[in-house]
């Protein structure tokens, strides 16, 4: 498969094509959808989950048959080397697709549950190369064929569909060390873990930060070198959070705040920092 058109033309006529999009992507795919699609049947995957209050921050499943211009839209992204969604082809009912992809929102990592932003090709692209055949089948579930733009070209997967692998109880997907093999190593894992933790534990703050300053991953990557060189290991994630959220002036005094214990672990400190930031933000809103 060399082009998007060739992929589309190779699919059986009864298969439906969908796209999983991130509504916060720079190319504003959800806005484009509502401006050009007719009708506009689509499914926010945060709906009916613990993140239902933030459906505009999570992935949406869109049936591309309702968007007559979808192919030219995607080809334009291809020409610009920026395609931010995941294309799916399936003969299964959309409700089954929704249930499956919702079940992947929470994944296990290092013994904890994290928000898995699989709908971001920058995250999934490198990971897909590391999946075993069995993992690819389980990950794609009721998806017959799968396509994403990665490193200047189309990356596809054609799993052998097994119906009994399409329904899961959350959380069921486990991210392993091997899944990070194609990425830059410890730095990438640290930044990936921190970004996922922020989207899960400070979604509103993280969304605001994204809307004001751009990709969270890019901001964290800029902070990483100084954090590793000058900040004690225990406090490195918290220091990056303070700078990310616009509170660098709190360092190093925040280490002396009531409730901060010398026996706290990294994630305890991160949560306490977020709580302090949220408290301050709410107080400022109330005083206006």
Image (tube, rainbow, N blue to C red):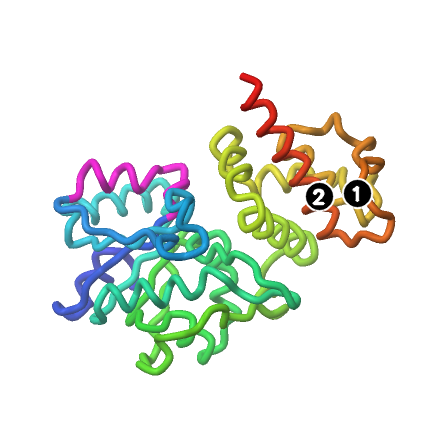
Work out which quarter of the rendered image holds the N terminus and state it: bottom left
Above or below 13: residue 183: above
Q: Residue at x 21, y 49 (%)?
A: 71
Q: Position of residue 34 (x, y in %)?
A: 22, 39
Q: Position of residue 59 (x, y in %)?
A: 38, 51
Above or below 152: residue 102: below
Q: Position of residue 172 (x, y in %)?
A: 49, 72
Task: Answer few, some or many: residues within 10 Å of disc 2's Cα (few below 14, many 20 plus, some between 14 and 19).
Answer: some
**Relative to the observer, which residue lies in front, 256 or 251?**
256
Q: Residue furthest top?
A: 288
Q: Residue at x 28, y 37 (%)?
A: 31
Label 2 vs label 1: CA separation? 8 Å
Q: Position of residue 273 (x, y in %)?
A: 70, 40
Q: Earlier in the sequence, mark 2 or mark 1?
A: 1
Residue highlighted by disc 1: 259
The numbered mark at residue 205 is: none
Q: Quadrant of residue 209?
A: top right
Q: Is residue 36 magenta?
A: yes
Please state if 234 lies on the left or on the right of 203 as rendered: right
- Identify the magenta region: 22-37
**Relative to the observer, which residue lies in front, 62 or 269?**
269
Above or below 213: residue 55: below
Are discs 2 and 1 less than 8 Å apart at CB? Answer: yes
Q: Secondary structure at mark 2?
A: helix
**Relative to the observer, which residue lies in front, 73 or 15?**
15
Residue highlighted by disc 2: 272
Q: Is residue 246 magenta?
A: no
Q: Secondary structure at mark 1?
A: loop
Please state if 148 lies on the left or on the right of 260 as rendered: left
Please state if 242 lies on the left or on the right of 233 as rendered: left
């Amino acid at each position: 498969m060399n082009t998007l058109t060739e992929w589309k033309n190779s699919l059986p006529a009864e298969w439906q094509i969908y796209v999983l999009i991130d509504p916060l992507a720079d190319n504003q795919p959800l806005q484009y959808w509502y401006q050009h699609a007719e009708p506009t049947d689509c499914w926010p995957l945060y709906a009916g989950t613990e993140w239902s209050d933030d459906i505009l921050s999570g992935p949406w499943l869109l049936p591309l048959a309702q968007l007559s211009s979808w192919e030219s839209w995607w080809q334009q992204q291809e020409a610009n080397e920026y395609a931010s969604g995941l294309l799916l082809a399936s003969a299964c009912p959309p409700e089954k697709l929704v249930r499956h992809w919702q079940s992947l929102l929470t994944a296990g990592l290092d013994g904890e549950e994290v928000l898995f932003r699989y709908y971001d090709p920058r995250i999934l692209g490198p990971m897909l190369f590391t999946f075993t055949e069995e993992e690819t089948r389980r990950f794609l579930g009721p998806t017959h064929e799968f396509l994403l733009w990665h490193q200047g070209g189309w990356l596809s997967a054609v799993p052998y569909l097994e119906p009994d692998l399409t329904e899961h109880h959350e959380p069921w997907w486990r991210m392993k060390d091997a899944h990070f093999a194609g990425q830059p190593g410890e730095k990438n894992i640290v930044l990936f873990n921190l970004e996922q933790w922020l989207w899960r534990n400070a979604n509103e703050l993280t969304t605001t930060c994204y809307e004001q300053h751009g990709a969270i991953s890019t901001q964290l990557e800029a902070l990483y070198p100084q954090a590793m060189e000058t900040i004690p290991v225990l406090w490195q994630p918290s220091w990056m959070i303070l700078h990310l959220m616009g509170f660098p002036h709190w360092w190093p005094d925040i280490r002396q705040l009531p409730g901060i214990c010398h026996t706290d672990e990294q994630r305890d400190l991160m949560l306490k920092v977020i709580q302090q930031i949220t408290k301050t933000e709410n107080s400022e809103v109330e005083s206006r």
